[in-house]
Amino acid sequence: MKRRSETRMLVFFFLAVANFLSWLAVAVPHATAQAVSPTQPTLKILTHNVWYGFTKKTEPRHARWLAWMKEQAADIVVQQELNEYTPARLAQEAATWGHPYSELLKEDGFATGITSRFPLTDVERLRDGFHHGLLRCRVQGLWVYVIHFHPSHFARRIEEARLLAEDIRSLPEAEPRIVLAGDFNGFSPIDQAHYDQDEQLVPFFQMLDQRDPNARNLNAGKMDYGGIDAIQGQGFIDTVAHFRNPKASFAGTFPTRLVSDEDHGSDRRLDYIFVSPNLLPHVQRAEILRNETTELLSDHVPVTATIDLNMPRIEIDQARRGFKLQGTKTAFTPWGFNYDHDRHGRLIEDYWHDEWATVEEDFREMKALGANVVRVHLQFGKFMASASQPDAKSLGQLKKLIRLAEDTGLYLDLTGLGCYHKQDVPDWYDQLTQAERWQTQAVFWQAIAKTCATSSAIFCYDLMNEPVVPGGTGRRDDWLGAAFGDKHFVQFIALETGGQPRPEIAAEWIAGLADAIRQEDTQSLITVGLVPWSLDRPGLTSGFPPDKVSERLDFISVHLYPEQGKLEEALETLQGFAAVGKPVVIEEMFNLQCDGPTLASFIERSSDQATGWIGFYWGQTAEEYDPPSTIPDAMMLAWLKIFQSQRPKP
C-alpha cells in the first residue's frame, strides 16, 4: 500500500509529469458535502393536496383533517394548495401532529409547504418557470421536492419537469437521494390502459379546453403523458405503481366524494411519490390512502410512502461474480477510497479522539465525491490493551465511526491487525509465539466483529493488509516487512514454515480469523488484501496464492498499481486473481507508477475481471489541490478527477 509522501513518490512522479499537467486541464465540478443528522429506522412521507387551504367547505372538514393528520404519525408531510396560509399558521398546525419544523413556499396563490419531525435544511424556493412554484429542502439526508405542476396545460408540465431536472443537476452530491412528492396534475403511462378504456375522459377534457382558451389538457385531441413520462425518463420510480398488485383494480387520487356535487370528471391519479433509483431499495411500501374518511377531507386523497433509512447489507450476487444489496436484485459496485491517513500523514487512531470533526468532514467529502465504500485501517496496537484484552476506548470510537458511516451512507471496508508504525507495536506482541500471536489476532477480530455485527454499514472485514508467509528454510527475526517510508504495510504471519507448505499456513491462518469473526458476525463479508505477487508464478511470491487460500474468503482483494507502458501486464495479473471464480475488488490502485490516462484505461479495461475499485483520499478535495503546488499534489488532483469522471452509474 502506498502513501502520499513527497520524498517517497518523486521517484515515480517524474515518470509522467508532462502527461499529468495535460491531464489536469480537465475540469472537475466541486461538490460540497452536506451534514446528515442521525437517522431513525424508517421515515413515513405523506403528500396531500388539501383543496384551497380549507377555504372551501371549511368545517368540520378542517378539524377532521387535523385530527386525522395526528393519527397518521407521519415523519414528513408535503402539502399543496395552502391558500391563505402564513408560515406561522403552518407551523402552528404542524405542531399539532408533532412536527417542529416547517417551510412554506409563498404566501400568495396556491402555496405548497412541508413539515417534518426533523430539521429542514438547504431550503430553496423556485418561482421562475413554475406555475405554482417549486419548494426543495433537505431532511435526514434526503432531498425532498414539493411538487405542484400546472393543472391544465400538458406542455407547461413537460417544461416544469425539465426545470426540475436542471435543479437536480445542481445538487452538490454525486448520488443524491431524492423524493419528488405532490400533485403532478399529470397522467402516468403506467395507467394508460385504464385511461384508454374510459370513454368519458377525453370528452371531459375537450370541454375544459373549449371553456378555457389558455388550457391545453389534451395533446392533439388525445391524453398526454409527457409530464410524468419526463419524470420517469429522468430515472425516478413511481412508488405506488412499483408496489401495486398488477391484478388490483385502478385507484386514482382525484376527485373524491367531497366534491361530488361538482363535475370533475372520472377518477384519475394525479398525486405521486417518486424516488431516485438509489433510494428505491429503501422503500418498504407505498399506497394511496383512499377510504371513507379521506374521501371527505379534500378533493384529493393522500399518498404515502415508508422509507427505511437503514443501509441494506451487501452480499454476493447469485452469479458469485459481484455484489448486490441484500434482499434485492440491485447490483452494488464498490467505488471508494482508502482513508488510511489524514493530510498530515497521521493514522486515524492518532487524531480521531481529539479531532473528530475532521473525520466527519472527510467522510462527507468522500460521499460528495461519489464514494460508496471507505477502507479504514485499524492498528493492532491501538485496539489491544493486552494479548487477551481489547481496548474499550478504541472500540467505542469505532462505534462512533460506524454511526458516521451509517449517517453518510458509506460502507466500511475494515482492514485490521495493522502495524504500520513500528513504534506503536507493543513489545509483548512481538514476543509471542506464532500460535499465541494468531490467538491474540483472533481476539482482535472477535472484538471488532462484536462491535460491528448489528450494523449493515460493514461492507467487509479485511483480515490484514498484504500478509506474507516467509519463504525459504530459515527463520525470520522480524514480523514486519521492509518499511515504505515510515510505514510497514507488509506483515508476516509466521517467522518460519517448519517445512509446511506456505499456502497451507496461509489457509489455516485465514480459517482461524474467519472463525473468530463468525462467532459474532455471520453476515458481513470477509476478505484479505493481497499483493499482486501472490499468484503462483516464478520469482517472489507471498505464500497466499488466491486459488489455494480463498475457501473461507467471500471475495478476492488485490492491490494493483499499473506501471507506465505495462498496462497489459497489470490486466494479466488481475486475470490471475479473477480465475478463482469469486468477485474481485481492486482494493488499492493509484497513478503512482503511471500517468492519469493509463490509470483511467486500467479501470475501464479491468471491468471484465473486477467488480470494485478503491483508491485513496487524504482529506483534501480536488478544489483544494487545484492548482497543484507540488508534483504529488498534481498526481492526487489527477486521481480525484479520474475518480469523479469514471464513477460507476448507480
Image (spheres, grey):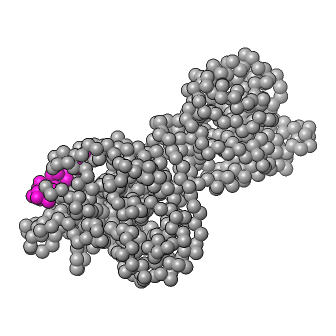
The residue depicted at 54 percent of the width and 69 percent of the height is: 626
Relative side of 414 to 124, left or right = left
The residue depicted at 69 percent of the width and 50 percent of the height is: 164
The residue depicted at 67 percent of the width and 45 percent of the height is: 124
The reply to whether residue 373 is in sight is: yes
Q: Nearer the viewer, residue 150 or 222?
A: 150
Relative side of 430 to 336, left or right = left
Q: Which residues are magenta?
A: 429-447
What is the x, y in percent for residue 282? 50, 42
What is the x, y in percent for residue 532? 30, 71
Quadrant of the drawing holding the N terminus: bottom left
Whether the magenta-drawn stretch holds residue 436 is answered as yes
The reply to whether residue 186 is in sight is: no
Whether the magenta-drawn stretch holds residue 387 is answered as no
- The relative height of residue 523 versus residue 293 in the rendered view (above or below) is below
What is the x, y in percent for residue 287? 60, 33
